[in-house]
Amino acid sequence: MDNLYAARIGALREMMRAHGWDAVLFTGSDPHDSEYPAERWMTVRWFTGFTGEAGDLVVTPDHAGLWTDTRYFIQAVRQLAGTGVELHKTRVPEQVLIPEWLADRADEDEFVLALDGLCVSAGTVEEIRAAFMERGRVCRVVSVPDLSGVLWTARPAVPQTPVFTADPGETRTERLSRVRTFLREQGCTRLLLTTLDDIAWTLNVRASDIEYNPLVISYLLVGLDDAQWFVLRQSEEDPQTRSALDAVSADGVDLRDYADIELALGECRGEVAVDGNRLSYHLREVLLEAGATLHDLPSPTALWKAVKNATEVEGMRRCQLADGIAMERFLYWLERSLQQDRRVSEWDAALQLGRYRAEDPDYLYDSFETISAWGPGAALPHYSTPRTGAPLLEPRGLYLCDSGGQYRCGTTDITRTVPLGACSELEREDYTLVLKGHIDLAKAVFPEGTPGCRLDALARAPLWAHYRNFGHGTGHGVGWFLGVHEGPQDIRQNLNPQALLPGMVVSDEPGIYREGLYGVRHENLLLCREAGCNDFGAWLRFETLTLCHYDTSILVTELLDRDEVIWLNEYNRRVFETLAPLLPAEVAAWLEEKTQPVVL
Amino acid sequence: MDNLYAARIGALREMMRAHGWDAVLFTGSDPHDSEYPAERWMTVRWFTGFTGEAGDLVVTPDHAGLWTDTRYFIQAVRQLAGTGVELHKTRVPEQVLIPEWLADRADEDEFVLALDGLCVSAGTVEEIRAAFMERGRVCRVVSVPDLSGVLWTARPAVPQTPVFTADPGETRTERLSRVRTFLREQGCTRLLLTTLDDIAWTLNVRASDIEYNPLVISYLLVGLDDAQWFVLRQSEEDPQTRSALDAVSADGVDLRDYADIELALGECRGEVAVDGNRLSYHLREVLLEAGATLHDLPSPTALWKAVKNATEVEGMRRCQLADGIAMERFLYWLERSLQQDRRVSEWDAALQLGRYRAEDPDYLYDSFETISAWGPGAALPHYSTPRTGAPLLEPRGLYLCDSGGQYRCGTTDITRTVPLGACSELEREDYTLVLKGHIDLAKAVFPEGTPGCRLDALARAPLWAHYRNFGHGTGHGVGWFLGVHEGPQDIRQNLNPQALLPGMVVSDEPGIYREGLYGVRHENLLLCREAGCNDFGAWLRFETLTLCHYDTSILVTELLDRDEVIWLNEYNRRVFETLAPLLPAEVAAWLEEKTQPVVL
């Protein structure tokens, strides 16, 4: 047992024996159901070495299994080799999920399952219990907060980065007042927020506690007349942080220590609104023991946050200018570098783009890890560009770059796929069909009340007509100086009933991926806007926010119809006219060439 | 109180007083949850005079209300005048549905609601009880089978028309065996079928008990080793009926009287599969009192029925030939009649089409009431052509005809909208955009597993792009020599997750309706078929079954793209080549002219 991870799992099994646990569950989650948990909560990685963004670990006396989805199968097989941990595939027809798998292992005795109740949602525990009940078995859940810390002695602390305030054109008093109106409407006395973007939105605070996300790790409890923010850094002397905390406090929000949340909830009676799908099992148990009556409701802030106000929309437009300048300078640099036979790796390219973005004073950091991929790498929609030994860009075929920035006035997310030299007919067709789907969605008009899932086929139909498709969603919501992925709206296969509302921002990113060869993805951000009323009802349409030209040199023009060519020419002209005055002269001249209209 | 309906409701109120009932509910349903109930069950019509296809009646001591949806508002206002019955609108944002309305009227005492438990589904009663419970009120339901019969002394009997057998290429023994496999898989001992199309499908029997639907009013109880069919006509001497009943009996199905269903269910123990959404409240109560354990599952026959086998598909194709011949002869006759200045009313036209259809030996009757509408009438998607005083067709504008037939080899449903003379620019645009949407859906390719709701936007996007839309679904399932509307699949706004499967037949019928002016609808039936597999997965596409040309004379060709024009020209050519040899010479010559290719 010389494998590091096998040894750690061995130590866990000894602990299980000592406590009489039949199984231990670790999820890839943190106490805030974050998309990107801080290192402290990367328990699955610590036990297994698996670095994928989604993975749950179950250990029993004779089995250790990692559950992850299609995106991570290849990576999991590689990373789990030698650890003794077996891969359980999810999102495949034959999947057996953790609740069923555990329940199938139970006999007539009570089955004891240990977990870190802070990092497992109440909903997950319900699903496990339901699976046991269906089989006539009984599962006792032992919740041990920070369970992994017993073995993981060098476990990192909760991150603490400087806190600052954001100005979205609506004060925190106004936002807290929205919450209180909601509480009164629902007959509740308190709302517990545990998700970090909802807290940041409500309090107009930001930090950098979570990679790529300007969030403060904390909890927020809003009552009808009071509010308590559970956050570290009470005694912080950094002036910016001090001033931000004071501003929150001045608006009637009591500052309490992060660790006090349990104490506070332990005294919580009355009608408490919680989002049961995202609340941790442990905090729910604390609330129930305290005698609170839980109202399981989606956090109202999720929808409020998704609908951008005028200031936020203006900010989203402004940061697209900065992003567009960086992207055009980057694409110019890329083309010149290759023309000059310079050696550029995928990683070099990502760094160069980051440098251009960093020149804008409003830019803080990227909104996710840049995917910079030439050829075969781009065939993986979730490719991770290696820092060392990254493949060199070759002067042929397609290069794909998916990146975004966190700016003080908004969040961006853009993908461009560009030819680095000669392309095959198939590459040209795929490039054109993906652009066709992208355009068809971007120029869609649709009735008020339409959910994104009903528009998804517009982006896919041009691909489907050629028997091509892509395995990810077409669009996700995007936050305002918050997470680059946010709900509740999306544009994808799943039948999510959330209507697209004026003020929502979504991505439009169809693709085609050819394993071992190349990938194509085109992505802009779209703002949903009102488009008038007539006898047929009220109408909505999109405004394209992103500003960066689409390369037209490898288009198979015959695959586009007239309206699509008109859209493309107008878009490229708008990009040129908007960005040219802000670009270095040689880049502007180059962009003028690049944006000459396509003739059908 | 000289109004006939007011008098009937007055008599009902006396009955309510005598029994101590606080309210009575009558639904527009029959004991079989039929789309078109026989006259015996048109209780709402008998009490109110309202003839719409959807309407529920609630009577309390001081209120009588009819609940119906948008389609019938105008008609309801007209027909309810003078009856004292008030219209309650459904499918509008401010709707208050019957469960909530009743519960809002309850005080602290027990509320007694009487209803005919045979004609109210178990699900409806659940909803009512839930609404009362939410408000802390109690509702006692008094179920009186055939409740209306006490006052409605001239109530018609249960219809009995000759029974005959159908040959769908699968024997009833095979179909019963499918049911028994299902029972074993689900751990059940019996399946109760109460819906008539499911029974007709399982037993390969047909009759004409329900208008437009070749169905036998009956119940079917299938056990692991036995089966009982509860049907009238036990002593029928008509040789066809006798032979059909004998054939069913010979396959091990016991024939019992229709009225015996209660007795039989009263002795039913064990695990019984029922479709709770469609089972009547009364029969469910009988089963529960008998001590049966109910497994609420959608009837497996619904999905089996929707997926046509090779014989059924071949039959669907064959009856389209007959239907196409009738339609082309009709359209020729229509054009000639108007050219010769003959007076033709909407009703005359419907009759003439019926005569042509009736010439086919396989034709039995129409699959629904023909909508024959010129100009303003066609603006109502559910227009009912008046038998007397029908508007005359004028030699200008658009004429819409939506019709279908029941043939021994299948069921048809087709809509054509044709110009009868000069058309406005708006008419031409609407005509073209609807055809564009129709074609875009018809030529769609899509991945296996796609539900119809994800394709709905393909038919609408061309209309949406011009800020136009239609208020009905795009497509419904169609039976094989059964109901012209059948589930579980459809293509509409609602997020119905049922995937389209190879062998399913759906309509493709977008439209545009201009109130007071005209309506456009184009409808063909589509067969879902496999279309191969590749690296991107398994693919499906549609085969257009319907054969009748689309008029191209008023197209605004610029609104169509190349692929759409290719589809249209190929379709019209196929219609001509297939039908011309079967048409009278002068009609064939005319059709050749009509199907000349459009040049883009």
Image (cartoon, coloured by chain):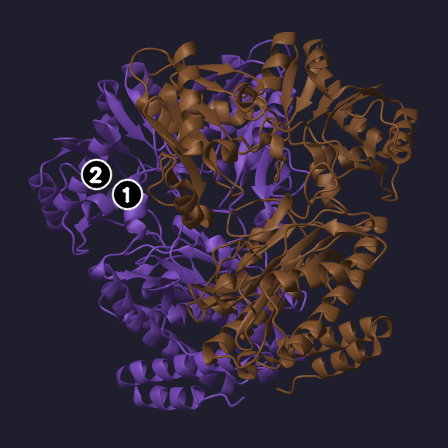
Chain colours: A brown, B purple
B270 or B281: nearer the eye?
A: B270
Instruction: For the residues labelled 1 and 2, say whether their Cβ atoms are less than 8 Å apart.
Output: yes
Q: Is residue A143 left or right of residue B90?
A: left
Residue A178 image position (x, y, % from top left)? 81, 32
Residue B232 visible = no
Please report the residue visible at 68 percent of the width from the left and 22 percent of the height from the top.
A273
Q: Which image quarter is the N terminus of chain B in? A: top right
Could you tell which of marks 1 and 2 lies nearer the N-terminus? Answer: 2
Q: Quadrant of residue A344?
A: bottom right
Front residue of A225/A204: it is A204
Q: Position of residue A152 (x, y in %)?
A: 54, 24
Q: Is residue A332 left or right of residue B353?
A: right
Give the residue drawn at x 27%, y 26%: B272
Q: Chain of mark 2?
A: B
Q: Is residue A277 left or right of residue B576?
A: right
Give above or below for B178 relative to A99.
below
User: Which quadrant of the view contains residue B218?
Assistant: top left
Farthest residue to the left: give it.
Answer: B250
Element type at marker 2?
Answer: helix
Estimate the spatial distance between the alpha carbons at disc 1 and disc 2, rounded to whole Å: 8 Å
Q: Which residue is mark 2?
A: B179
Badge 1 amino acid: Thr
The single residue placed furthest to the front in the displayed view is: A2
- Camera-side residue of A301 and B469: A301
Name which residue type carries label 2.
Val
Report the residue marked by disc 1. B301
Instruction: Using the rendered image of the protein, determine whether residue A27 is visible from the camera's viewpoint.
Output: yes
Are there few (<14), some (14-19), or many (20+) residues within 10 Å of tag 2?
A: many
Residue A505 picture location, percent across and down: 71, 52
Residue A216, compared with residue A60, is above or below; it is below
Label 1, secondary structure: give it. helix
